[in-house]
Image (cartoon, rainbow, N blue to C red):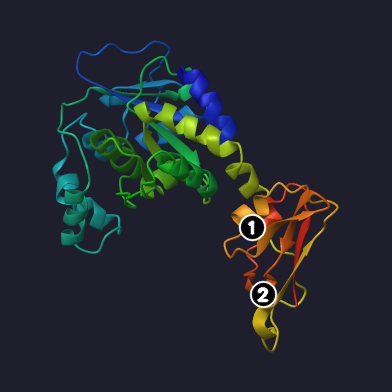
């Protein structure tokens, strides 16, 4: 798939609000990609991401970077003494001591000054270059599905290295380029003060080379898991009295199966974690039967998975 096709697939499967942003750091002497424009005013890296997700393709040499901290972290310029020492973090009242500031600075990823000469950003669908990373501005539920897609083929869980400081430059760009691993960020002082990221959005950055694999995994998840979760298929019936003086005795559950609706597909039996439901033969046809209803834990998996809506659980 090309950039446009990958972007279209990701946008559809995740129902993205914003375009994924392709980010590339250009080395000295590297050719400037086509269809990118220098912004008319200097921008912070986090602000450039905002413009790119809105449809702009940008070429940003050091003179177009408004944040010296971010530009230095990405290896475009030398780090100023006040930023290197951590002094400015104290002046901004973002950290209490110089020791805290220096510890934070020492633990973040950054490139040596002069490693790169410019940054290039574009909506992924318009990127006429191969990005280093692709940055998503997304909601937590969409972030969860990206995590699931990353685990789909390996089963591995994720460890993220992030902070409330230098979120888009260090955590989303340099960190991901160096480790070749997906990373998350909740934004930072600069990213939230200068951009339009909402209180309900966060960032995920993915190495570009991993996007096709993620897209394939999301396609598999879109066949069942994503639509089921979004339909809230395991939501139990509304209970009028949520709080009562005493718990229901034994928390007993009636498992009712409509034999006329049941087609004998066997999904309820396969999914039931307590083996409450068994397939029986009735008049020569397979039908689901709750053979040990006293073991039901009311997880609602059988009701949610039944394609015929033949199962109802009632607490008594």
Secondary structure of residue under mark 1:
helix
Q: Which residue is mark 2?
A: 294
> What is the secondary structure assignment of the residue under circle 2?
helix
**Is residue 232 visible in the rendered structure shown here?**
no
Q: Position of residue 104 (x, y in %)?
A: 22, 53
In this view, 170 is above or below 302: above
Disc 2 crowd, CA 10 A, few/some/many (<14, 14-19, 20+): some
Residue 166 in view, yes or no: yes
Looking at the image, residue 228 lies above or below residue 179:
below
- Indicate left or right for 170 with 213 as reference: left
Q: Which mark is residue 301?
A: 1
Q: Position of residue 243 (x, y in %)?
A: 69, 81
On screen, residue 205 versus residue 281, left or right, reads: left
Disc 1 and disc 2 in contact, CB within 8 angstroms: no
- The residue lying at 67 percent from left, 59 percent from top is 278
Front residue of 83 and 182: 182
Q: Nearer the viewer, residue 276 or 21?
A: 276
Q: Quadrant of the C terminus?
A: bottom right
The image position of residue 2, as x and y in percent, is 46, 17
Q: Residue 265 at x, y = what percent?
A: 71, 46
- Residue at x 22% of width, y 20% of height: 27
């Amino acid at each position: 798939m090309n950039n446009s096709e990958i972007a279209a697939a990701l946008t559809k499967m995740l129902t993205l609000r914003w375009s994924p942003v392709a980010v590339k750091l250009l080395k000295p002497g590297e050719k400037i990609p086509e269809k990118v424009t220098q912004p008319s005013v200097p921008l912070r890296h986090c602000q450039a991401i905002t413009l790119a997700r809105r449809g702009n393709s940008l070429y940003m040499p050091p003179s177009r970077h408004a944040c010296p901290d971010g530009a230095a972290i990405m290896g475009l310029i030398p780090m100023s003494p006040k930023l290197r020492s951590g002094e400015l973090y104290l002046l901004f009242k973002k950290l209490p001591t110089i020791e805290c500031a220096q510890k934070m600075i020492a633990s973040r990823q950054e490139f040596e000054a002069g490693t790169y000469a410019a940054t290039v950003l574009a909506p992924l669908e318009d990127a006429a270059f191969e990005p280093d990373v692709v940055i998503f501005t997304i909601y937590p539920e969409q972030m969860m599905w990206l995590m699931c897609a990353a685990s789909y083929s390996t089963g591995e869980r994720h460890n993220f290295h992030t902070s409330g400081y230098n979120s888009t430059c260090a955590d989303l760009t340099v960190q991901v380029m160096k480790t070749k691993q997906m990373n998350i960020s909740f934004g930072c002082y600069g990213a939230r003060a200068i951009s339009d990221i909402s209180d309900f959005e966060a960032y995920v950055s993915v190495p570009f080379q991993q996007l096709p694999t993620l897209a394939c995994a999301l396609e598999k998840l879109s066949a069942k898991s994503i639509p089921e979760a979004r339909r809230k298929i395991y939501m139990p019936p509304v209970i009028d009295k949520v709080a009562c003086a005493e718990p229901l005795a034994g928390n007993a559950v009636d498992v009712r199966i409509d034999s006329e609706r049941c087609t004998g597909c066997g999904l309820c039996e396969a999914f039931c974690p307590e083996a409450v439901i068994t397939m029986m033969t009735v008049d020569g046809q397979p039908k689901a039967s709750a053979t040990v209803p006293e073991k039901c834990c009311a997880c609602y998996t059988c009701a949610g998975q039944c394609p015929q809506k033949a199962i109802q659980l009632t607490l008594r």
